[in-house]
Amino acid sequence: MHPNKRLREDTFAGEDTGEAAVTRSDKYYIPGGDLVCKAENTLFRVHSYHFMRASPVYCVYSTQRSPLESFNDTHPLNLAIRAQDAAALMWFFYDSPYNWVSGDNTIQGLFKASTWESIMLAADKLIMPQIARVACHTLDHLHRLSDARKVALGIRYRLGRDWVAPNIRRLLRDENSLKEEDVCVMGPRMTVLVVRGRELLLRRHMVEVLNQAKTTLSCAACLCDSKGPPRPRLRHLAPSPNASGTQHHAGSECHQQHEVLPNDAPSDALVDSVIAMTSLFQGVDNAPGPPPSASRCFRKGIPNGDIFIQVEDRKFQMHSYPLIRASPFFANMFSVPLGNGQIREGFTADCPIKLDIRAHDFENLLYFFYDSAYERLPGAVDPTAIPMWESTLHLADMFNMREVKEVALHALGRPGALADVHKVALCMRYNVPRTWAETAFLALCTRKQAPTWHEMAELTPAVADAIVQAREELLRRNALAWMAPDAIQQIVNKRFLERPATAAVSGKTSIAT
């Protein structure tokens, strides 16, 4: 919905005057949050930045209020949604960056499709289209969308032709009639288009079948099972025996009519022509593409952030919550008690926390905290995102952000994300369990081409030596006899998996002196 359009009457309904007793959310009543909102009888205290980021409607609504007005426990913002849907929405804001889907598993915690159903409901009610798109992709990955529902969501949120094309084709090809729930999900307009397309496809396909049957069908070829739905019938020529006892078409007419059963489903070309004729793709084009790599740096300011951090010559204002949630280092820093008259470092622009790191790396870490959830595409490997994840891994290792590091390793560990040498180098540099790069080490040892000097320069001397020794051992043993996979694995175990860990290359110094 465009922010200039009329707001829904029950969206962001303002303060609630109900008499029912309310309770604070156990997990999402966050200290330092500047917005208190209510869903049913539950209060949530969160950062208004997330609503500003997600909903153009909230941006308009917040500008219509007086700067002196604020939402608190007494006068909360009424979301007019279920409490469980509101909790799922807060989970998206604060916890979903730490939970990624890999196949049918997750790297951390329980990943429930019901949570994403709630996120979808909340995003639709509060007009948060980008969150709804993420929910669509995730529910599709979890196989929770029927063809009809996926088509309806694809049109509603402009998810693109490629996303809905297979489902539209299946709806047209399906021999079963549309179900009542499919009609309800798609709505009148899309249902009419699908019905027209199905009827047109049946007629055009049957014409093709009949034309083919008239020229190629013989009596022996048309014997068929009479089960199934009624089929059109044809007159055809009956073969008659000749003098040698073999059959041939003598031109006599066989008066028995057999069913013509099209064994082939309509071709993709025929289905696509029907889609084009019925405008079934109307409304699903012009889908928003993925952000360019340059936009994966968080350069936006957060005016209501409660801390200031200086990196190189730049000063960042942000919330302390994501740093406290992710890092024991920062949690301890902000919890140290102060003496009388002392000012806590980082809580004023004149006394920021100074970090001895690169500003670009810190921008990427902030992107993880604030924006990474919005481009969740399960299973996809985006090459332009690799530098962002490497920066995130570097700072997560430096500041002991265990969960952030786990997510970065998951993103970088997917097949095709990194070159084999670079993956082994990262594994050793950040003291990652060797199994993370086992496949890459094996590929380096068994490939025909020897490592180049550029590759060797990226590795520590110990790892480079291990690769050289493993390759030579494999070559010697392979020259005498064929090596079984188990024998190769033993060499990998000895040279890489069981090799003693060495000190990390990168240090842990982080606070500028």
Image: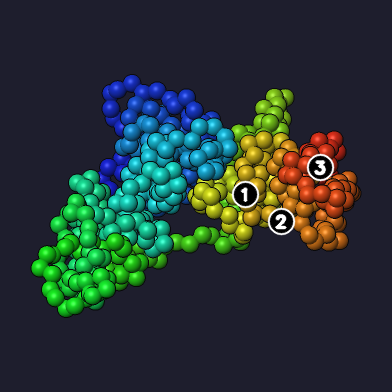
Give the residue number, with chain letter if any, for mark 2: 419
Quadrant of the rendered image containing residue 114: top left
* Residue at x-position 71% and y-position 36%: 400
Distance from disc 2 to disc 1, alpha carbons, whole Å, reads 11 Å
Secondary structure found at label 1: loop
Quadrant of the rendered image containing residue 486: top right
Q: Earlier in the sequence, mark 1 or mark 3?
A: 1
Q: In the displayed image of the protein, which residue is found farthest to the bottom?
A: 251
Q: Amino acid at mark 3?
A: Ile
Badge 2 density bin: few <14, some 14–19, many ≥20, Cα 10 Å: few
Q: Is residue 67 visible?
A: no
Q: Amino acid at mark 2?
A: Ala
21 relative to 465 in the view: left or right: left
Give the residue number, with chain letter if any, for mark 3: 491
Give the residue number, with chain letter if any, for mark 1: 414
Distance from disc 3 to disc 2, alpha carbons, whole Å, reads 21 Å
* Residue at x-position 54% and y-position 38%: 106
